[in-house]
Image: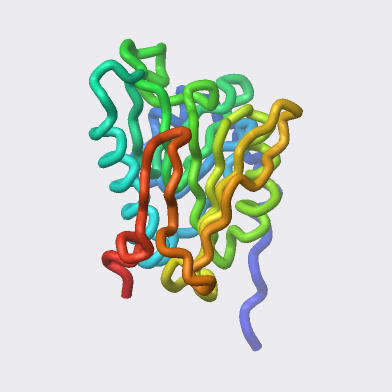
C-alpha cells in the first residue's frame, strides 16, 4: 500500500507578498513565480520551443526598435520582464515579450522596469498549460489595463513551430478586436507585418530559429 499523502501543509497560512518581499527573493526562486494581488502563483517552466519562439520575437522587436529614426520616441523591447500592474496589492505580469516606453529615471523600488501604463505591446506564446490563461484571462486583463496591442502566438500541438499569430488592438470601448491573423497553413508569406505599434516584419523562418 502506498503511503498516505501529508496534506498538513494546506493548513499553513500562505503569506501575502508585497513588493519589498518579492524584490528580496533570490532570483532563481522569483523567476518561478508570479504574484497576483499579493498571492503566490507558481509558473511551470516553458518548453525549449516556447523559449526559442519567445526569444525570436524579442530579438525581432529589439531589431525593429534599433531601426527607428532618431527623433522617434524612445522604446524598449524585452522578454520575461516583470510588468507592474499594481503596487498595493502587489501584482505583476511577465509576458513572453513586451514593448514599452523608455523609463529614463528609476521610479522607487521598481526602478526602470515597466508598468502597465508604459506598455504598448505584450506577446504571449501559448503552452499546453496556459491556453485558458492566454486566450481568455490575459486577454481580459490586458484590455482592462489599457495595453494597446496584444499578440497571441499558437504553436503546432502547443509545442512545435509557430502556426499562427493573432494580433489584437484595443478599441475605444476597452475591448480587443482582431486587427490581423497570420496563418502558416494558409500560406501567409510572413508571420508579422505591421506598422503599429512598431514598424516590424517577422518571417516564419525567423520564428523557427533554434527549434527542436
Q: Residue at x 49, y 24 (%)?
A: 115
Please determine whether, in this image, residue 190 is positioned above or below residue 32.
Answer: below
Horizontal side of 146 relative to 21 (left or right) equals right
Q: Residue at x 66, y 34 (%)?
A: 143
Pick the quarter of the image with the N terminus: bottom right
Frontmost residue, 161 versus 85: 161
Measured from the top left, where is residue 39 in percent x and y?
Answer: 62, 37
Which residue is outermost to the right?
A: 173
The quadrant where residue 146 appears: top right
Pick the quarter of the image with the C terminus: bottom left
Please determine whether, in this image, residue 102 is positioned above or below residue 41.
Answer: above
Q: Residue at x 34, y 42 (%)?
A: 61
Frontmost residue, 81 versus 25: 81
Which residue is outermost to the bottom?
A: 1
Please determine whether, in this image, residue 116 is positioned above or below residue 45.
Answer: above
Measured from the top left, where is residue 109 in percent x and y?
Answer: 40, 17
Horizontal side of 19 relative to 3 (left or right) equals left
Label count reads: 0
Measured from the top left, where is residue 177 in percent x and y?
Answer: 68, 43
Frontmost residue, 69 versus 24: 69
The quadrant where residue 106 appears: top left
Amino acid at each position: 500500500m502506498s503511503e498516505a499523502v501529508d496534506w498538513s501543509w494546506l493548513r499553513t497560512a500562505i503569506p501575502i507578498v508585497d513588493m519589498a518581499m518579492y524584490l528580496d527573493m533570490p532570483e532563481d526562486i522569483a523567476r518561478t513565480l508570479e504574484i497576483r494581488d499579493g498571492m503566490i502563483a507558481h509558473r511551470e517552466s516553458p518548453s525549449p520551443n516556447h523559449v526559442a519562439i519567445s526569444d525570436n520575437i524579442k530579438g525581432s522587436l529589439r531589431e525593429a526598435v534599433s531601426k527607428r529614426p532618431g527623433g522617434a520616441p524612445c522604446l524598449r523591447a524585452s522578454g520575461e520582464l516583470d510588468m507592474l500592474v499594481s503596487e498595493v496589492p502587489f501584482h505583476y505580469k511577465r509576458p513572453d515579450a513586451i514593448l514599452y516606453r523608455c523609463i529614463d529615471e528609476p521610479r522607487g523600488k521598481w526602478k526602470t522596469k515597466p508598468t502597465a501604463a508604459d506598455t504598448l505591446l505584450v506577446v504571449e506564446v501559448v503552452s499546453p498549460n496556459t491556453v485558458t490563461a492566454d486566450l481568455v484571462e490575459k486577454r481580459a486583463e490586458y484590455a482592462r489595463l489599457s495595453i494597446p496591442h496584444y499578440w497571441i502566438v499558437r504553436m503546432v500541438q502547443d509545442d512545435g513551430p509557430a502556426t499562427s499569430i493573432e494580433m489584437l488592438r484595443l478599441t475605444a470601448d476597452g475591448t480587443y478586436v482582431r486587427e490581423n491573423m497570420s496563418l502558416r497553413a494558409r500560406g501567409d508569406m510572413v508571420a508579422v507585418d505591421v506598422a503599429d505599434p512598431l514598424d516590424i516584419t517577422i518571417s516564419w523562418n525567423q520564428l523557427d530559429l533554434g527549434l527542436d
